[in-house]
Image: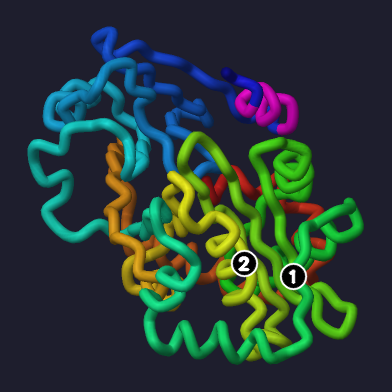
Amino acid sequence: KTEWHDFLKSKFNWIDFEYYLYKKEAIIPFAKIGNQRISLPFCEYGGPLILKEKISFKEFNKDIKEFKDIEIKIHPKINISIDQPPQKTKPEMITYMLDLKGKNKEELLSSFRKTLKHSIRDAKKKDIEIKKCESQKELKKFYDLYVKNLKHRKTIPYPFFIFSHLYKQPETEIWIAKYKNKIISGDLFLNYNNIIHYLFGAIDHKYRNIGSNYLLLWNKLKNEAGKEKVFDFGAAPRKSSLATFKRGWRGKEYPIIKIKRAHQKMDKKKFLRSANLIRTLWKLIPTPIIKRISKKLIKYRI
């Protein structure tokens, strides 16, 4: 199915898609952006779509060398035989996956890190309402928090129409937390096959200490407890506060395997200096302007 690709092409005139058949064993979908091929943009993972039980990573990595400007991030649960270490060092990006099968909510709660359990119990004592996002108005409030969070992190946010499109899909769930009749945080989950993917989260920094983000995740987990589901906490830089937060839920750590080959080598120091300058200036731009220009600039993030 290519509905997602068709949607992206309808919104961005600088993107196209190509599909390659690999040895009748897998389909490799690429988004073509200029001279680059990325599998897949606006997703935390991409990689080959396996047509058989598994394929060899060693052979796949060797054969894919004919592409010079590519980036592939392989889903940790994909049926690809990792018969050699994909990277000499620990991968920069990781995820945590928690198997919910046969576990009731009490067992889940008891398995969490001690400080996390305390945060959940403390948040329960506060007058926080957890509910599904049920209107465009609530969706826009959640998106506003997301944009402010990414501005704080000096990162380009996805345009609102990405959120609006996902909101309409049956696989998507958006939960929000309200405190004193105000939306203070929200989470977006994708449910597909037996995977629950935690894709986006946002919080009002004024209320970051009352624990609404813990309650949101706990609400989703306890609702899915015992089912034949795997909860994917989503990508995080290995050495980050986000990874520390996700690690506390006691999921199993998986590397996000990345294949990246650039046709031309760049001056790394020059690139880093330019990137740091842009990120510093980005934090100074008013939020309404960031929301308007994100569509034009998002190509430089993916």
Residue 1 screen position, x and y as percent? 57, 18
Q: Does any portion of residue 282 appear in the rendered image? A: no
Q: Secondary structure at mark 2?
A: helix
Amino acid bearing label 2:
Asn
Q: Camera-side residue: 266 or 22?
A: 22
* Residue span colored magenta: 4-11
Mark with earlier residue (1, 2): 1
Q: Residues within 10 Å of mark 2 (few under 14, many from 20)?
A: some
| Residue 201 in picture, x, y percent from top left | 62, 64
Mark 1 residue type: Ile
Q: Residue at x 74, y 66 (%)?
A: 176
Q: At x 27% / y 17%, what residue is drawn?
A: 52
Q: Quick check: marks 1 and 2 in contact, CB under 8 Å?
A: yes
> Would residue 52 appear left or right of 298 to someone viewing this image?
left
Instruction: Give the residue at mark 1.
Output: 130
Dominant secondary structure of the magenta stretch?
helix
The answer to which image quadrant residue 273 occupies is: bottom left
Q: Which residue is mark 2?
A: 219
Residue at 59 percent across and 20 percent down: it is 2
| In the depicted structure, whether residue 104 falls above or below residue 125 | above
Residue 53 or residue 73, whichever sits in front: 53
- State the image coordinates of residue 149 (x, y, percent, origin top left): 65, 71
Nearest the viewer among 209 and 149 is: 209
**Is residue 136 rendered magenta in the image?**
no
**Residue at the image point whose x is 56% and y is 53% from the top:** 199
Instruction: For mark 1, give the secondary structure.
Output: strand
Q: CA distance from mark 1 to mark 2?
A: 8 Å
